[in-house]
Image (spheres, helix red, strand yellow):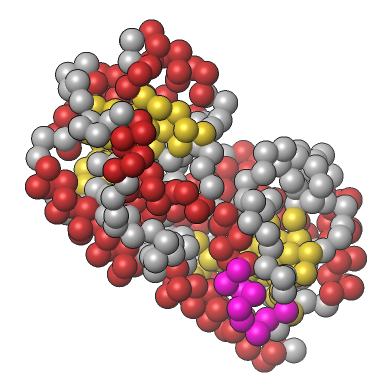
Amino acid sequence: MRVIYFSKDYTPHDHRILSALSETDHEVHFLRLQQSQRIQEDRALPDSIRTIDWIGGSEANPAFEEPKYASDLKRVIEEIKPDLIHAGPVQSCAYLTALTNFTPLLTMSWGYDILRDAQEGNGRKIAEFTLSRSSLLACDCEAVASAANDLGMPRDKMVIFPWGVDLNHFSPGSAEELRAKLGWQDAFIILSTRALRPIYGVDILVEGFIQAAKLRADLRLLILHDGILREDLERKLREENLEDRAHFVGRVGFDHLPAYYHAADLYLSASRSDGSSISLLEAMASGLPALVSNIPGNCEWVELEKTGWWFEDGQSHSLAKAIEIAVKDETILKSYGRNARKIAVLRANWDVNFQLLVHAYQSLSEANEKAA
């Protein structure tokens, strides 16, 4: 089957999917809408993936001229003659594909496009239009599926496809050298790996940590990733004289991520909107208990009194209280961590979950052949 994989940028998620597709019998062409100023994925595309030259793919924030982009996408389709286009997010790549009337279109939600961008105004109208032209919707959790259904997408035209993680790369372990390097051998380390942007609630995370740290001298905060809120967060910690109890690492490459999960005692996400968070699944696969905001996507994975704790979304005081509870019992922490690993093995195995996408490709191809 000849496939166009059309994505907004080139991220670790795109690399994971394209790498898996490269090992199938499909002929896969990669179409990229934009290129961020900061490289999001430094691993090269698999050799068998063919990149497409078109008007997009080179600018960080291209002017989104619908007729211009849709026209050139039509040219690409005529030249490549794909049997299937796999496109997402909904309001950008999938929408442009829908404008061409190409079928079959497998629209892939990236979570935020349905849960946030489609909830009002033009974003909702575009999502409704795109879904109405989609042959199938791939989404990563029930929360996204339910929201898509509210936008008019029938349940029988969806496949729930949790993207999952590499269970060999992300597995339980220890990182005493990293803890020693930080001087945190005897500390209780809380780990955050989300981008430092408002949507991920990192301001709530730091405020909750500050409140809890005033009561527990051994608490430490390890922050991976970067973003527009970094200076504000560092300032808040300085004002509370806690800057030496938090460490901002910045963006960490895929190969080095496991060591940080191994060094931590608890994974924390205060995200305001999420589907199945890959960072959360990585932490669970690494045997970490989790403390997360009680948004639907998180609650589908973190089970109370089994793998972790919830706190009220957007409430730093609720988060601080939850931290106090989480750090009290080392036996419970270890038990929750073991349970988290078991759930990741059962439900977040990338090698198993990817087959759902392969099956979706096949079913769309067979349906298209029957309709021809």
- Stretch in magenta: 19-27
Whether residue 304 is visible, yes or no, is no
Give the residue drawn at x 44%, y 64%: 166
Q: Quadrant of the C terminus?
A: bottom right
Q: Is residue 325 left or right of residue 247?
A: left
Q: Is residue 42 left or right of residue 78?
A: left
Does the magenta portion include 370? no
Q: Quadrant of the N terminus?
A: bottom right
The spot of residue 91 in percent (x, y) is 66, 50
Q: Which residue lies furthest to the top in this view?
A: 239
Whether residue 255 is visible, yes or no, is yes
- Residue 204, quarter of picture: top left
In the image, residue 174 above or below residue 246: below
Residue situated in front as seen by the camera: 15 or 292? 15
The spot of residue 351 in percent (x, y) is 45, 73
The total number of labels drawn is 0
- Residue 19, quarter of picture: bottom right
Q: In this view, does 122 lie to the left or right of 240?
A: right
Give the residue drawn at x 57%, y 43%: 117
Give the residue drawn at x 47%, y 33%: 249
Q: Residue furthest bottom?
A: 370
